[in-house]
Amino acid sequence: MCGIVGFISSTEHDSNLVFNGLKNLEYRGYDSWGIVADTDQQLVDQKFLGKITSFPDQIPPSFISLGHTRWATHGGITLDNCHPHFDCHHQVALVHNGIVENYQSLQKDLKNHRILGQTDTEIIAHLIEKYRQKHNLLESVRLTFNQLHGLNAIAVMEHQNNQIIVAKNGSPLVIGLGKNANYLASDINAISNLTDQFIFLEDNWLAQITPQNVQIFDSATFKKIKYTIQKISSSLTDTDLNGYPNYLAKEIHQQFQIIKNINQQNLNQPINQILKLAQKSDQIFFTGCGSSYHAAYFNSLIVSPKINRPVYSFPASEFSPYDNFLTDKSLLVVFSQSGETIDAINLVNFAKNRGVTVASVINSPYSTLHRLADICQILPCGPEKCVLSTKTFTAQLALFLRSIGQDLTDSIFDIQQILKTRYLSKINLLAQKIASYQHIFIIARGNSLPIAHETALKIKEVSYIHAESFSGGELKHGPIALIEPGTPCIIIAPNDSHYDDIISSATEIKARGGWIIGISSKNNSVFDNYLSVSDSGLSTALSITVIAQILAGQLCQIKGYDPDKPRNLAKSVTVK
Ligand code: G6P
């Protein structure tokens, strides 16, 4: 989603610095972008719709600059709505992440201002302009920021004013400290090549950044805040495609090594602490969003019998009916790739206020969910760049499978076979046939149901085919009405206690003309097409997931779409 990058320096830099930072944020998803820099005469900006391609030729070298990638929420994808936004006199420039929930009421006080677009952001620049008549820039930003409702991060600069002011509540911001230069970004990845010293801003902090200094204040009281500087090495970015055609392919292939590493790891990790805590907690909730919710769901199913306690799983965005059951004896385990998904963060903040112990299982060190959690398990995946979550999802599963005592050796061998050309070609033949259909259904039971949900999500995210997952048990209560002659149905049938039941479901679909594609370790005459996996017990879920990811990627390729940047999607969903 939206990204912020900026710098202020005592020497001139060209806008490459901000440009490269924005490129590092591309993976988060966006639909327009812009940069502003100051010159002796004026603030100069350039805005673009679509992808970051060439370097902005009109932005001169400067001592101070801000950049932004926008993922449209309020107002269409137009240059007027693209950031940076300005006040009426083009003296104040502002970039913003988040949503100003009360922007319509704030706009009522700005009657004489020239507002060009439809965003919630632009009014912030005009409010600052209003306060600027009586106050300095820092105070004007503070007064404005305190009026904003919602979860927001802003960065503000002014013509011929050697400072950047930033403020945040909810949406992340980090300041990087350099030599006679300071940097800021909404994601450490954007500036991790420039410095190894960082200040992570907390909610309702306001910072004044000059080339040599950073001062931080509480935005409500204006009291100075003592902050800590964290030293973090820049090994966070692994941006090479290493010969793969796209990040989806690269990250699918990386899973073999990642799961192998997890299998070899010493299990004396936070994850064990999480399981121990689960045994002592009154209620245990696993949560997440998107693929991470599917991982939460799968892990809740496998952990529950292990600890002989119910483990409930819910999407973070749908947790509110259970709010009242969260107490200081509850454990909330939140799964997330980015560590910045707003629905998960909101739930964690709520839970912490009720005294709940919060554990996070995330792939992004130093993210908000890392910092908020009482215990944090970092996934050993390295950065995931493709919008689709692949290696994070299987790592989330693999770690929990290991923690309940599963040996992953068989599934690692199986994944190695699946990633070989022979198996890939087999999936490709199938994908060629499926690609012409508008609908595909994925049916599973028990522990495989979250894997069916993940399969459907992967296919719809990247191929735009309507893919829907159903429980085999629910099939007859409605979904079977959708089956027409030829309808492709993937049946996930590992060799577990549900095998016979799921084969019955397949038979019922076949009786109505459905096309049965079985993914199983046991072939069956009901399968029209058969994708074999080895029987590795609960860990078979890993091999099945890899097949599903490959199928989705191939459908995308056949249809000619970009697998790394699916339409309308963002990697990091930082707004509600
Ligand atoms: C977005 C992404 C999904 C991801 C979900 C949760 O919707 O497109 O791939 O699963 O966010 O993200 P998280 O970073 O919390 O795992």
Image (cartoon, rainbow, N blue to C red):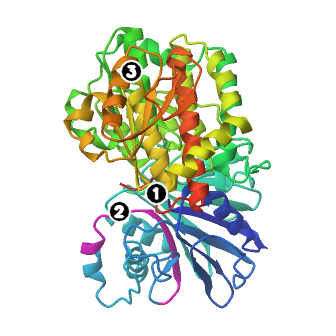
Depth order, front residue of 518/242? 518
**Magenta stretch?**
89-105
Label 1 belongs to which residue?
464
Please give the label number shown on residue 301. 3
Question: Comparing marks 3 and 1, which lies closer to the viewer?
Answer: 1
Q: CA distance from mark 3 to mark 2?
A: 44 Å
User: 343 or 195, which lies in front?
Assistant: 343
Q: Is residue 112 left or right of residue 76?
A: left
Q: Amino acid at mark 1?
A: Tyr
* Whether residue 346 is situated above or below residue 536 in the rendered picture: below
Circle 3 SS class: helix
For residue 231, say whether it is visible.
no
* SS category of the residue bearing label 1: loop
When the figure is inspected, residue 413 is found, relative to residue 389, above or below; the finding is above
- Image location of residue 341, percent across then percent down: 44, 47
Determine which quarter of the picture holds residue 293.
top left
Residue 335, position as x, y percentages in the image? 46, 34
Give the residue number, with chain letter if any, for mark 2.
146
Residue 535 on the magenta span: no
Upstream in sequence: badge 1 or badge 2: 2
Within 10 Å of disc 3 (Cα), the crowding (few <14, some 14-19, many 20+) is: some
Q: Quadrant of the C terminus?
A: bottom left
Write the residue at 28% across / 46% down: 482
In percent of width and height, residue 188 lies at: 62, 50
The amino acid type, in three-letter code, at marker 2 is Asn
Mark 3 or 2: the one toward you? 3
Instruction: Answer with mark 3 or mark 2, whichever residue precedes in sequence.
Output: 2
At x 47%, y 40%, the residue is 455
Inspect this view and state whether residue 17 appears: yes
Circle nearer the viewer, 1 or 2 = 1
